[in-house]
Amino acid sequence: MTRLIAAVAALCVLATACSEPTAVVSEDFAGGRDTFGTCAACHGADGTGGVGPAFASVRETFPDCETQIEWVRLGSTGWQEEYGATYGATGKPVNGGMPSFAKLDDREIRQVVLYERVRFGGADEVTEAEACGLASPTP
């Protein structure tokens, strides 16, 4: 009986750990989640896409946060004027449609990029927060 209770408890812990991404551990992640509501209109609430592309390969398209931050800030028209006809490491053609989010402040853009990279791209939150300029490097 003790073994059965222990096994059930272990399965409950495992099911909880595997069912959702890790709990929100930072204010920046939470801020990004809140801002993502605007992005969800095109990219889907679950990040699987719609009018805009899915975020499953966001870290392949944008291997570093800074480039993704710039893409969000400029939008497709601004990107094309500044950098040319393709974007990201995979050289995707700029087809238009991505609006500029320059109306958001720098921190809000960094937060939403952090959220997208962690929630949909599978990045580690602490490491990505540092890479996105939201946290000091750990010693």
Image: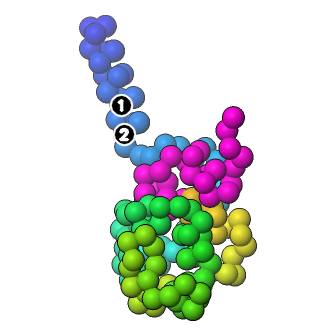
Q: Who's the residue at 71% across and 70% down the image? A: 106
Q: Is residue 22 above or below residue 12?
A: below
Residue 85 pos. (x, y %): 45, 88
Residue at mark 2: 18
Q: Who's the residue at 54% across and 69% down the image? A: 68
**Of 130 and 82, the residue lying toward us:** 82
Q: Who's the residue at 57% across and 59% down the image? A: 114
Residue at mark 1: 14
Residue 120 pos. (x, y %): 43, 59
Q: Are marks 1 and 2 in contact (CB under 8 Å)?
A: yes
Write down the quadrant of residue 72 in the picture.
bottom right
Residue range corresponding to the magenta coloring: 115-139
Image quadrant where one finds the C terminus: top right
In the image, is residue 136 part of the stretch drawn in magenta?
A: yes
Residue 82 as seen in the image, left or right of residue 3: right
**Of 68 and 107, the residue lying toward us:** 68
Residue 49 as seen in the image, left or right of residue 100: left
Write down the quadrant of residue 65 in the picture.
bottom right
Q: Is residue 10 above or below residue 42?
A: above
For disc 1, the neighbor class at 10 Å (few under 14, some 14 to 19, many from 20) is few
| Disc 1 residue type (three-letter) | Leu
In the image, is residue 125 part of the stretch drawn in magenta?
A: yes
| Disc 2 residue type (three-letter) | Cys
